[in-house]
């Protein structure tokens, strides 16, 4: 994610899609990552997701970590559980504010019996400050 030139009081919106093939096992795999600029704060405004592998069955889960710690989003839970083959339109997330300099990772875990294509669609608001 490329944040713009910092101008105090300016707000930018970013809409990005990311996808990764996630191997078998319940280990967190980073799907998307970004660092909030030092003189800004950010909010994840909406989150959409897709899991697709024809040969797979079962479910997987998503997490958003800020500086390595899972945050609550999408209705107050730190994880979103999904059925394979399910596609969700981007929906508003909990208004969690992320401070400048923080690293944000969107991760997916795959406890199914096949490699999963895991994709996310994010909308992020960046508010620049002095």
Image (tube, rainbow, N blue to C red):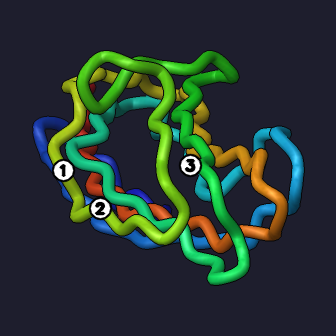
Q: Which mark is residue 99?
A: none
Number of numbered discs overlaid on the protein picture: 3
Residue pictured at 77% horizontal, 40% vertical: 28
Q: Secondary structure at mark 3?
A: strand
Q: Secondary structure at mark 1?
A: strand
Label 3, label 2: how far apart the Cα atoms are: 22 Å
CB under 8 Å between callouts 2 and 1?
A: yes
Residue picked out by circle 1: 91
Q: Closer to the N terminus: mark 3 or mark 1?
A: 3
Q: Which mark is residue 34?
A: 3
Residue 40, position as x, y percentages in the image = 34, 33
Residue 42, position as x, y percentages in the image = 32, 35
Q: Is residue 97 above or below residue 83?
A: above
Left or right: 39 as drawn, with respect to 27: left
Q: Secondary structure at mark 2?
A: strand
Picture quadrant where residue 127 is located: top left
Q: Closer to the N terminus: mark 3 or mark 2?
A: 3
Residue pictured at 29% horizontal, 22% vertical: 96
Depth check: give the residue in front, 58 or 65.
Answer: 58
Depth check: give the residue in front, 12 or 84.
Answer: 84
Residue pictured at 63% horizontal, 83% vertical: 54
Label 2, label 1: how far apart the Cα atoms are: 8 Å
Q: Which mark is residue 88?
A: 2
CB under 8 Å between callouts 3 and 2?
A: no
């Amino acid at each position: 994610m490329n944040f713009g030139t910092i101008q105090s009081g300016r707000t930018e919106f970013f809409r990005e899609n990311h996808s990764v093939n996630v191997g078998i096992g319940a280990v967190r795999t980073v799907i998307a990552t970004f660092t909030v600029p030092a003189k800004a704060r950010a909010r994840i405004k909406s989150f959409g997701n897709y899991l697709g592998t024809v040969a797979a069955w079962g479910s997987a889960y998503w997490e958003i970590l800020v500086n390595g710690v899972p945050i609550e989003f999408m209705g107050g839970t730190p994880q979103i559980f999904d059925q394979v083959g399910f596609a969700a339109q981007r929906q508003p997330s909990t208004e969690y504010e992320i401070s400048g300099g923080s690293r944000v990772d969107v991760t997916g875990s795959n406890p199914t019996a096949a490699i999963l294509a895991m994709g996310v669609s994010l909308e992020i608001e960046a508010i620049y400050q002095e």
